[in-house]
Image: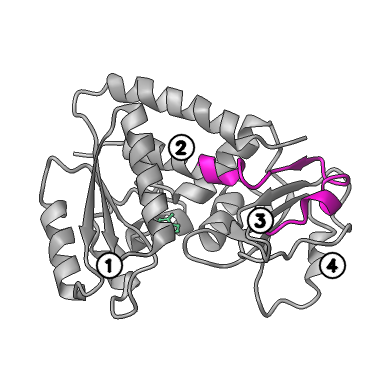
Amino acid sequence: MILDGKQTSAKILDMVKDRVSALDKKPHLVVILVGDNPASKIYVRNKQKAALQVGIQSTIIELPKETTEAELLDKIEELNNNSDVTGMLVQLPLPEHINKNKVVTAISPKKDVDGFNPENVGRLAIGLEPYFYPATPQGIIMLLDEYNIPIKGADAVVIGRSNIVGKPMAQMLLKRNATVTICHSFTQNIEDKIKTADIVISAVGKKIVRCKMVKKNSVIVDVGIFKNENGQLTGDVDFDVVSPSAGFISPVPGGVGPMTIASLMLNASKVYQ
Ligand code: GUN
């Protein structure tokens, strides 16, 4: 069965739209884009499109790639202190001269719609409710829930250990009582891990889940999205080889991507005073 992120995200966006229309204080999302990374520009535009669709005011602040770290931190401080702004994010990656950890630390935890601020990361890690969960893992959990896929007690393998996907994904699965294995570039015999997993979540950016050895009826979630040698958009999972054995599998495109956007809009609709 296909995990249809397009259809599920549309349902969530409808729900967010209703929620926003009932709010007294209207949410206002600010997205900061530093430099001119073409992929980032597309992501930022898609976020703004979704915000408009659900009635969330959205502002994009484009800063030149020469922006200094201090200038960016000043801008964040200004937005932290602006009570009209209820949520913000700084699109990653940043130019090399800017330390991303300093940037996410500067964002007020109550406006940190990406959930990347160390207070939110720490809250998730110690079992306190974070103000926001990172959008991609939260979107994946919502997709699994939509299809009533059991997480409690499942053996889950997360491939990739980024701060954006892999690490928060592992924490969120753990919170739902899965047994979690995190695989990365130094993991040995990754195929052995994949073939015993009930749930595989791959967030690497290259074709890594190729084997026919996924467990029968397992759940395969593909977070990767990149262009292959023929210029086609593809994911981490060799869909044709893996899908006959899988119970559920998410396509690329149309799987995790739209869920991430819907999940971010759900976050952006949360207004803390
Ligand atoms: N770049 C890739 N994914 C993300 C994300 O979820 N948030 C931000 N801010 N930048 C990203």
Which mark is on residue 262? 2
Give the CA distance from mark 1 to mark 3.
29 Å
Which comes before the other along the chain, label 3 or label 4?
A: 4
Number of marks in the image?
A: 4
Which quadrant of the frame does ligand 1 lie within? Answer: bottom left
Which residue is at a point 39% across and 27% down the rendered structure image? 16
Which comes before the other along the chain, label 2 or label 4?
A: 4
Pick the quarter of the image with the N terminus.
top right
Give the CA distance from mark 2 to mark 1.
24 Å
**Camera-side residue of 58 and 154:** 58
Give the CA distance from mark 3 to mark 4.
21 Å
- Indicate the amino acid at tag 4: Asp
Which comes before the other along the chain, label 1 or label 3?
A: 1
- Indicate the amino acid at tag 1: Val
> In the structure shown, which secondary structural element does the residue marked by tag 4 occupy?
helix
Which mark is on residue 248? none
> In the structure shown, which secondary structural element does the residue marked by tag 1 occupy?
helix
Q: For mark 3, what is the residue?
A: 235
Which residue is at a point 54% across and 46% down the rendered structure image? 257
Above or below 134: residue 94: below
Q: For mark 4, what is the residue?
A: 192
- Indicate the amino acid at tag 2: Ala
